[in-house]
Amino acid sequence: MLARMRCRKRACRGRPLSVLLLWLLLPVVRAHAAELGFSAPTGCLDARALQDEIEQLIGSPLAEVKAVDFAVDIERVIGDQWQVRVRILPRDATSGDGRARERRIEGGSCDEVASAAAVAVAMAALEREREDRVPEPAPAAASAPGEPASQRSPDRRSERRTSGAAGPPAHATGTRPLRFGVAAGGALDVGALPQPAVGAQLELFAGYGALRVTALGTLFGSQDTHLPDGERGGEFQLGLGALLACAEVQFERVFALACAGFELGQITAAGIDVMDPRERRVGWRALRAEAGLGWPVGQGFSLLARAGAVVPLTRPPFVLDETERVHRPSSLSARVWVGVEFTR
């Protein structure tokens, strides 16, 4: 009985030593496992979800990948443009060429660039795994001169794992997704009416990549004009709708637009101090070309300004008492618009 008690005491004295030894060796064991650094704006994907997606692509825990770490940094660039920076960080010279590698991918949302980052990390992890499993070929079995290294037979297990992640998704190429928006602002016309006219303009647009199609409506305020005698004259107003096709080019902080299209509308005129004061409505048809510049200022919002020229296809004269002309649209009009747009 006493001997068993002594044995138990010795076992109890040895157990804390084993626990201490395991605790000291644990950082060394963990040091060989891959680590994933992650940063993203609030409300974006979290690190746990990104790691789950990576492990699903490679078919095993990320901790099984050795001698290399990964860093994923997601940020919003401008408007609805996002960018992710993926860094592969070898811990020693045995991983690839021993140098850190970096890749930048752009997309239209946080989820899109995060998915692209997961694919990039998974491909790098599988590449590192192949390097660990496949031995260096003997000199006699080396590839023939001129044969690319990509023709070597890959590991069958890696082939199965990468079957669902053969390459980056389409959004990794930087193409912007389908988008819609609305815009409103003030418009200025010089030439269609007797005097420069200020109006209100509302726009709806849809775009994909570098193409944008805009449908708009504009109403210019009424204005009076008189003959040299200062008494008789006319009151004019212009309302129109237009359809424009635009090319959109993205820069670092702004985007540019070049648009062309046509507009249809109506000029309403009424005589002042004349024998027949009835209103007259005349159709308005014109070709339109303009250029613009946009500046993103917030979540989906941008300030936008466009200016261009309008060439009317018809220029009806407006006369008083069928004898004296009071106005005729100019053969070339200027059009300016400044407003704010929201893109979704």
Image (cartoon, rainbow, N blue to C red):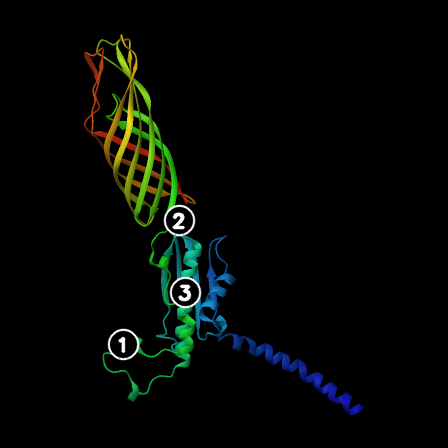
Question: Residue 35: image x %, image y %?
Answer: 48, 69
Residue hosting label 1: 148
Q: CA distance from mark 2 to mark 3?
A: 22 Å
Helix, strand or loop for disc 2: loop
> What residue type is disc 1 on?
Pro
Q: Residue, x 40% and y 49% (percent of image)?
A: 80
Q: Residue, x 63% and y 79% (percent of image)?
A: 19
> What residue type is disc 2 on?
Asp
Q: Nearer the viewer, mark 2 or mark 3?
A: 3
- Number of labels in the image equals 3
> What residue type is disc 3 on?
Val
Looking at the image, tell me whether mark 2 or mark 3 is earlier in sequence order: 2
Q: CA distance from mark 1 to mark 3?
A: 24 Å
Q: Quadrant of residue 214?
A: top left
Looking at the image, tell me whether mark 1 or mark 3 is earlier in sequence order: 3
Question: Residue 83: image x %, image y %?
Answer: 39, 56
Observer-nearest of 140 and 28: 140
Residue 19 visible in image: yes
Helix, strand or loop for disc 1: loop
Mark on residue 240?
none
Residue hosting label 3: 119
Q: CA distance from mark 2 to mark 1?
A: 40 Å
Observer-nearest of 263 and 13: 263
Image-based side of 259 in relation to 177, left or right:
left
Q: Residue, x 36% and y 71% (percent of image)?
A: 99
Observer-nearest of 251 and 11: 251
Looking at the image, tell me whether mark 2 or mark 1 is earlier in sequence order: 2
Question: Residue 185: image x %, image y %?
Answer: 36, 33
Q: Quadrant of residue 66?
A: bottom left
Mark on residue 80?
2
Helix, strand or loop for disc 3: helix
Task: Kindly indicate whether the residue at mark 1 contacts the one at mark 2 (C-beta within 8 angstroms).
Answer: no
